Amino acid sequence: MLKLLTALAAAAVLPAPATVRAETPDSLRRPVTSTYSVEAGGSRMFDTYLSPLRYDGVRVGLSGEWQKMMPASPRHLLMQMDASISSAFDRNPARSTTMYDFTAHFAWGMLYTLRFSDAWSAGFGGTVGFTAGAAYLPVNGNNPANADVDVMLSLRAQGAYRFTLWGRSFTLRDCVTLPAVGAMFSPEFGESYYEIYLGNSSGLAHAAWWGNHFCIDNRLSLTFPLAGRQVTAGYRFSYASRWVNNLSSRRVSHSFTIGLTLGPQNPGVR
Amino acid sequence: MKRKYTSAIAALAATASMSLSSCHDAPDYDTSALGTFDCLWETVDTRYCFFAEKDVDWQEVRDRYRPRVIEGITQTELFGLCSEMLAELRDGHVNLSSAFDISYYREWWSLYPQDFNWRTVQQYYLDFNYRTLGVMAYAILPQNVAYVRYSSFSAMPGEGNLDIMFSYLSPCDALIIDIRDNGGGELTNIRPLVSRLIHDKMVGGYISHKTGPGHDDFSKPYPVEYEPADKGRVVWNKPVAVLTNRSCFSAANDFVAVMKEVPGVIIVGARTGGGGGMPFTAQMPNGWNLRFSASPMTDVRGKSIEDGIDPTQGCEAHSPAEELAAGRDAILDLAIQKLTNH
């Protein structure tokens, strides 16, 4: 699945020979906007497979986002790809142990964008995303970790406001992603990974929807020039919860993000 | 008008997301004595797997113990009270760990004779002359019977080490695997040893798990299969005796359940101590850790092994302490006799 997505994404990002015109390279007509960020902030989580308690601490991560207008509709169709890895270190209420969370995420999506004016634009569309990770509680004996894996089709909306201040160009952007339907993995209520290792795969894969897998990811960012570079700073709210097989988990984080943007601040706007 | 619609949609979305997310909630226990007690009781109530086998009315247990969690109770007192409550389950896999103590239910072995003294075996049977591979010791007895002492399933020698050991023992006519006082360890460590002693793929028992919080919410039993060692490995195909006592617990108990089904293997000694449920761990709000049986295991006939496994018919034996002190191990003697009379 990941290979297919990567191939699709690469095909969309890389210049297609059939559409390249000699006089104007594709990369100039439809440049890629890339943003590479680090993030850090507060984290709260629980996973009832591992523990009946709630944990809180910090989450740190790295992310990359790539955007490009599509040749089929260079004024409206925006392709987006994003990838991230993050890790949380959350303490139990007694502050005696730490629960760790490691998560990797990749998504590819397409947005239909509208430009209301030179300043305002909005986009609506969908993504297909893959998440793989695990929560890890070292003090547990036979149930020290629980995997968190899903493939989701998501709704995505974003709005951008471009303005000039002190003679410099700024872009304020908010992007909300709401996974809607897909599939996810979960062990059964008291099932050990040893039993899964023995080959019992019954009840592990589940259809996912808002009723049993509710997530939201909101990224608010401001991109501005600084010292000859485009800097993107912002805030990210991430909420991911699952309720399946009588097990419940939730990961919530509020993070500050900072990174560098390469290419135009707003894809399709020169 | 437009603003009204926008507000209505926003309110609807907020309500929908709040109601959806509220389904995904978890209990919020506080770190007080009562919060800790409630968390512990509910964790056992929803996740413990042997209420039927133990015939314990857990609700009645709560009604008896909860009023004793009074204002001002110290952590030590609370620990004692919770340990006492957990002991009602009569399960050696149920422990409460704190910074100052770990609770154990010990009666599964303390009420029974020990039937083993490693010093006796070393001195009077091995003459202190044996080879060691970590948790394994091995030697050849004067009757040309191989003797392997496996003290803990917490570790297992590597496949190459097992090859060397079985090659060394291969001239012998029979094999004794002495797992008395083996309190268990990793279930996965059973496999390398079993694989040397079987010649065909076999089902050694069944495992199941809880599918929900109800006391009777269990999955269908899933077969635990064992396969012979890979080609090229040194295997054993002569008679085997496994020596047991009441202190064979957990993974050692599972090993006995499997070995009892292997053709040419006899179980000699006393009934094992049980521990037929794979334990899980859960943290309590005040930082204590609770371990409890979560996944029940059975033998191939579907019989619970939680209360232990009997020796093969005609092979029950005990080694009284006074005999052991005098240099005689009746269980080991019986095994040698059974194997050499084959």
Image: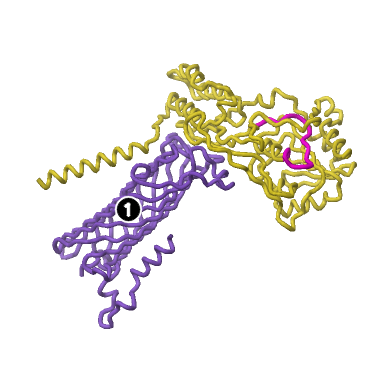
Instruction: Looking at the picture, tell me which residue is in the foreground, B337 or A170.
Output: B337
Question: What segment carries the magenta color?
Answer: B259-274
Majority secondary structure in the magenta region: loop
Instruction: Looking at the picture, tell me which residue is in the foreground, B36 or B145.
Output: B145
Q: Quadrant of residue B176?
A: top right
Residue A170 location (% of width, % of height): 20, 61
Local crowd size for mark 1, using a 10 Å CA cut-off: few (<14), some (14–19), many (≥20): many
Query: Which chain did the image draw in purple?
Result: A
Q: Quadrant of the N terminus of chain B?
A: top left
Residue B73 against residue B274 in the figure, above or below = above
Q: Residue lying farthest left?
A: B1
Q: Quadrant of residue A47?
A: top left
- The kind of residue tagged 1 is Ser
Tell me what residue is drawn at x 75 percent, y 32 percent.
B311
Instruction: Looking at the picture, tell me which residue is in the foreground, A42 or B292.
Output: B292
Left/right placement of residue B245 relative to residue A152 reads: right
Left/right placement of residue B283 relative to residue B261 reads: left
Residue B161 location (% of width, % of height): 74, 52
Tell me what residue is drawn at x 28 percent, y 54 percent.
A156
Q: How many marks?
A: 1
Tell me what residue is drawn at x 35 percent, y 57 percent.
A128
Query: Which chain did the image draw in yellow?
Result: B
Residue designated by label 1: A154
Q: Which chain is home to disc 1?
A: A
Residue B74 against residue A264 in the figure, above or below = above
